[in-house]
Image: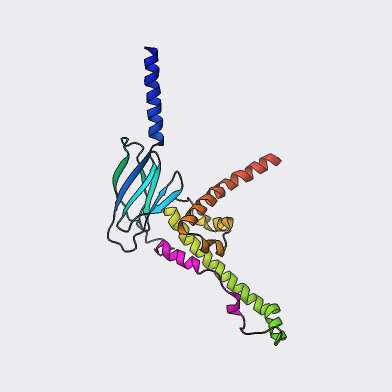
Amino acid sequence: MLSRLSLISLFFIITIGQSFAQKVTINGQVVHKEDPTFNLLIVNRNTSKGTFGEKDGSFKVMANKNDTLLVGAIGYKTYKLSMQDSALQNEYFVRIYLQPISFDLKEVEVFPRRELESIQKDIRSLGYDERDYVLTGIDAYMSPLTFLYQQLSRKEQLKRRAYEIINEDRKRELLKELFIKYVNYDIIDLSRDEFDDFIDFINVSDQQLMSMSQYDFVIFTKERFEAFRRKPQRLLQDINTHD
């Protein structure tokens, strides 16, 4: 009798363990009004992996049964999807209704709604060529005074520095625009007051931004955000250690 109970218990434990780790297929259809700018993004919160859905709002992903999926699109509230409490099966079919984000007209700051691809295109155009902002065709041997003037003149140096600042400000504004969307997708949890500090913390260069895909930058941002949130704790630990 005891042996039989042991076998039943073992079977129950194995079954439960398999259900927790079982891979399932989730087929989804997101319902939305006809929108030519609709861009569906599905992110697995547990693995930080994401994929884009189809323009018609359909998607198909593999995940663990207990994983939480974040389904969202620009201009819509993010929908959290989990099969954890559903009956165990290999494949699920879900229909999702995304709710548009309502904007408070009293807001002082208005951020234009843009596609991620549009922002990414602007990011790829970051940077500038110093040769665009100095006299062209100057030969150091044939015209050494003019050449030295361009290299050493305080005015020319200030001009080049001004364009560096303009480019940096432009990059900062593009990053803020991206982070607003990442916050809406629940990828990061930042207030707008923290954007500048976070941008300084990640210290990403023009070359890095231009070389990363949208997905790569989402993962990079999520990882740096987690480090950003841990930073005050590390500082506190260092202070306590030295006390």
Residue 80: horizontal and vertical position, in percent?
37, 46
Judge from the rendering whether residue 84 lies leftward or rightward of residue 176; answer left or right: left
In this picture, which residue range is highlighted in magenta?
A: 109-137
Q: Quadrant of the N terminus?
A: top left
Compared to residue 203, the image places residue 169 above or below, namely below
Residue in the picture at 39% in, 37% down: 22
Residue 61: horizontal and vertical position, in percent?
36, 47
Residue in the picture at 60% in, 78% down: 131
Residue 82: horizontal and vertical position, in percent?
36, 42
Judge from the rendering whether residue 227 lies leftward or rightward of residue 140; answer left or right: left
Compared to residue 180, the image places residue 242 above or below, namely above
Q: Quadrant of residue 5?
A: top left
Tag count in the figure?
A: 0
Judge from the rendering whether residue 109 lies leftward or rightward of residue 97; answer left or right: right
Compared to residue 33, the image places residue 9 above or below, namely above
Q: Is residue 110 visible?
A: no
Q: Is residue 20 visible?
A: yes
Task: Based on the picture, tell me whether residue 231 belongs to the magenta stretch.
Answer: no
Task: Based on the picture, tell me whether residue 114 belongs to the magenta stretch.
Answer: yes
Please name the colour scheme applied to the rendered image: rainbow
In this view, the residue in front, 230 or 220, is 220
Compared to residue 201, the image places residue 140 above or below, namely below
Q: Quadrant of the C terminus?
A: top right
Residue at the far top: name it.
1
Q: Quadrant of residue 134?
A: bottom right
Judge from the rendering whether residue 112 lies leftward or rightward of residue 28; answer left or right: right
Residue 164: horizontal and vertical position, in percent?
59, 70
